[in-house]
Structure formats: C-alpha cells, structure tokens
Image (spheres, rainbow, N blue to C red):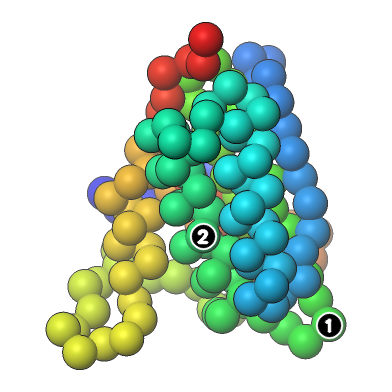
Amino acid sequence: MRPATTPPAGLVHHPASTHEFAMQFTSTPRGARLARRLVSHRLHEWGHPYDSTANETLTLIAAELVANAVRHGHVPGRDFHLRLAAAPAALEIDVTDTRGERRPRPAPRPPGPDDESGRGLLLVDALADRWGITPRSAAPGKTVWAVLGVVPPR
C-alpha cells in the first residue's frame, strides 16, 4: 500500500469520534516507551483490551512511529507529539516531530538481509489500513499518521 500525502477525512474532525488522547513526549527512548504504553492503556480504557488484535496492532504501529520520531525526527530540545483518536469503526494515530526535511519514503523499500533497521514503515504499511505523511502548517516538521479499521468494542 502506498501512503497518502494528505490525511484521511480524519477522526479529529469526524463527528463520530468518541475518544481522543493527545500528549507531548520527550524525543528520547524513554519518551517513546511511555508513548507506546499510554497508547495501549488508552485503547484498553476505550474498550479494546490489552490482548485484543486492535490494541496489539495499533500499539505496534505506535511503537514504530514514535521510534522514527525519536530516531529520525529529533531536534535537540524539541519534543514529539502523539494524538490517538477512536471512532466506532476506526482508530487513528498521529505522531508529529519537528524535522520536516526528514520525510519517510512514500513507498518503503525492503532493507537488505544484513541491515539492522529499516523495517518499521514496512510494518506500518502492512498493518494499517491507510497511512501517510502531512507537513506541519504552523511550524517546521511533519506528521506521520495511520488509520486502523476495527470492530466496535462492546
């Protein structure tokens, strides 16, 4: 799947959005770990249990996006921002960093067999229903977003 360059008819402005969580994190491995844990915790609170496919899948997508924000989008003294939104049939995650010039490739290429990195966006591409990259309008940087269709929680 090729990522889109503009966000979907996002859940942020969608009237069916039932939950939203947003927070800034330090651009460090510790900040990435906390972001990943909070995504899983919020999804659990919103009716997608820790061991559900939706929780495990979106937590993995979150892990890849925040790891990229820390590794490739880090600017000293600048944090990354995470937003998570839930609607009855979809979950959306956005991760924003301050490095607009370091954009992911629109079509991730498979790494070589000996490469130690380069598989994160391949996982996002395989797991998300849609994903993409949007430049920030008010400040330098970019937002990488992903949408996952889900069965509504009971």
Q: Position of residue 64 (x, y in %)?
A: 47, 63
Residue 114 placement, left or right of 102: left
Q: Position of residue 63 (x, y in %)?
A: 51, 60
What residue type is disc 2 on? Answer: Ala
Q: Residue at x 35, y 81 (%)?
A: 117
Residue 111 placement, left or right of 45: left
Local SS, label 1: loop
Residue 10 visible in the snapshot: no
Q: Residue furthest left?
A: 113
32 or 20: nearer the eye?
32
Q: Residue at x 16, y 84 (%)?
A: 113
Q: Residue furthest top?
A: 154
101 or 30: nearer the eye?
30
Query: Based on the displayed image, in which of its 4 quarters is residue 53 positioned?
Result: top left
- Disc number at residue 60? none
**Residue 61, placed above or below residue 9:** below
Sequence-earlier tag: 2 or 1? 2
Q: Name the residue tied to disc 1.
A: 77
Crowding around mark 1 (Cα neighbors within 10 Å: few <14, some 14 to 19, many 20+) is few
Q: Name the residue tied to disc 2.
A: 63
Query: Based on the displayed image, in which of its 4 quarters is residue 107 positioned?
Result: bottom left
What residue type is disc 1 on? Answer: Gly
Q: Position of residue 7 (x, y in %)?
A: 54, 43
**Residue 153, placed above or below residue 42:** above
